[in-house]
Amino acid sequence: MHEDQGLIEVELSDPNVHKLQFDLFKDEFKGMLVEKLGDNQFKLKVKIVERKDDDSPMNRLYTDQDKLNYLIETYPAIAKLKDTFKLEVGNFG
């Protein structure tokens, strides 16, 4: 088998967020590929690529902290609720 034959390369632009998200569903993704391709003789390679400045924010994965920060910017009262009830990101489930 040629070195590149059977290689499936997944490109991620954020080594922290995207890699963590990908790792959560990697096994499910591999299973889907085996089912769809009818073959399990492949290698899955994760490649980190730099984001271009012209990348749309719509192509970005947002962390829970990113989402909270956006909500606090948009609705400052959320910060007061967060502090009043001593809430932290990740305490919901």
Image (tube, rainbow, N blue to C red):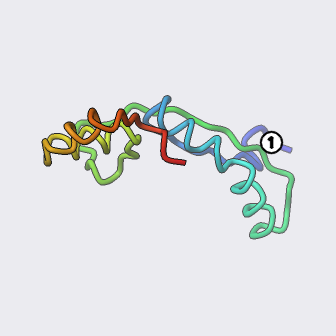
Which x, y percent locates residue 57?
27, 48
| Residue under label 1 | 2
Picture mark count: 1
Along the line of sight, the residue nearer the viewer: 66 or 59:
66
Q: Which residue is at 35% across, 33% downward?
A: 86
Q: Secondary structure at mark 1?
A: loop
| Position of residue 69 in the picture relative to residue 50 (left or right) | left
Quarter of the rendering containing residue 36: bottom right
Q: Which residue is at 20% across, 41% downward?
A: 72
Instruction: Give the crowd class for mark 1: few <14, some 14-19, many >=20 residues within 10 Å.
Output: few
| Position of residue 47 in the picture relative to residue 7 (left or right) | left
Along the line of sight, the residue nearer the viewer: 88 or 21:
88
| Position of residue 80 in the picture relative to residue 49 (left or right) | left
In the rendered image, the quadrant that contains the N terminus is: top right
Which x, y percent locates residue 49?
45, 33
Q: Amino acid at mark 1?
A: His
Q: Which residue is at 14% across, 48% downward?
A: 75
Instruction: Establish if 33 lies above or below 20.
Output: below
Q: Which residue is at 62% across, 44% downward?
A: 9
| Position of residue 91 in the picture relative to residue 73 (left or right) | right
Instruction: Establish if 34 lies above or below 13.
Output: below
Which x, y percent locates residue 8?
67, 48
Which x, y percent locates residue 90?
48, 39
Quarter of the rendering containing residue 35: bottom right
Quarter of the rendering containing residue 45: top right
